[in-house]
Image (cartoon, rainbow, N blue to C red):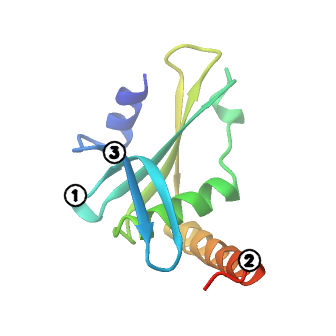
Amino acid sequence: GCVDAMRQHFGDQAWIAERSFAHEIGFGGKCDLHATADGGIVADVKTKEFSDPSKVDAYDEHLMQLSAYRVGLGIPNARCANVFVSRSVPGLVKVVEWSSDDLARGWQMFSALLKFWQLKNQHS
């Protein structure tokens, strides 16, 4: 299942579950799983109806969330992945790891949206 897929993809890690954070630039969140060794790993688990892993994709919203979480958790160079767990097929899991270029783009998109939100809401 999920644990086996994570171990296969990332090796053995000392995972920290459900850590909340608030960042000084004005955002926060609650990370499903992260590890701090070797630069860190941030993983977000999503359940989804699927039976064919090749048809499961991660989206820019997932990318922005993960890129923000790694900054918020203080591990800005962490590897990041979405872990999709099938609701249709017990034990079926797909790990989608984002590239460092994608994560840099995700952080830029997130930062732009955060700035927009702060200006729109007159949030200093």
Q: Nearer the viewer, mark 1 or mark 2?
A: 2
Q: Nearer the viewer, residue 61 or 5?
A: 61
Instruction: Tell me the SS state at disc 2.
Output: loop
Q: Is residue 40 visible?
A: yes
Distance from Cα at disc 1 to Cα at disc 2? 38 Å
At label 2, the amino acid type is Asn
Image point 41% across, 31% down: which residue? 5
The residues tagged by marks 3 and 1 sit, at their Cα atoms, a distance apart of 11 Å
Asked whether, in this view, residue 22 is left or right of residue 58, the answer is left
Label 1: which residue? 37
Q: Which residue is mark 3?
A: 10
Q: CA distance from mark 2 to mark 3?
A: 40 Å
Task: Find residue 121 and name its label.
Answer: 2
Q: Mark 2 or mark 3, which is nearer to you? A: 2
Task: Return the x and y of residue 117 as percentages of the image width and height.
Answer: 71, 75
Residue at (22% x, 58% y) in the render: 37
Q: Residues within 10 Å of mark 3 (few under 14, many from 20)?
A: few
31 or 99: which is nearer to us?
Answer: 31
**Looking at the rendering, in which quadrant would you find the N terminus?**
top left
Q: Residues within 10 Å of mark 1 (few under 14, many from 20)?
A: few
Q: Is residue 79 above or below residue 14?
A: below
Asked if residue 91 is positioned above or below residue 58 in the image, the reply reads above
Q: Is residue 18 left or right of residue 50?
A: left
Residue type indicated by callout 3: Phe
Q: Amino acid at mark 1?
A: Ala
Q: Is residue 113 above or below residue 90?
A: below
Are the residues flagged by discs 2 and 3 in contact, CB closer than 8 Å? no
Res. 99 in view: no
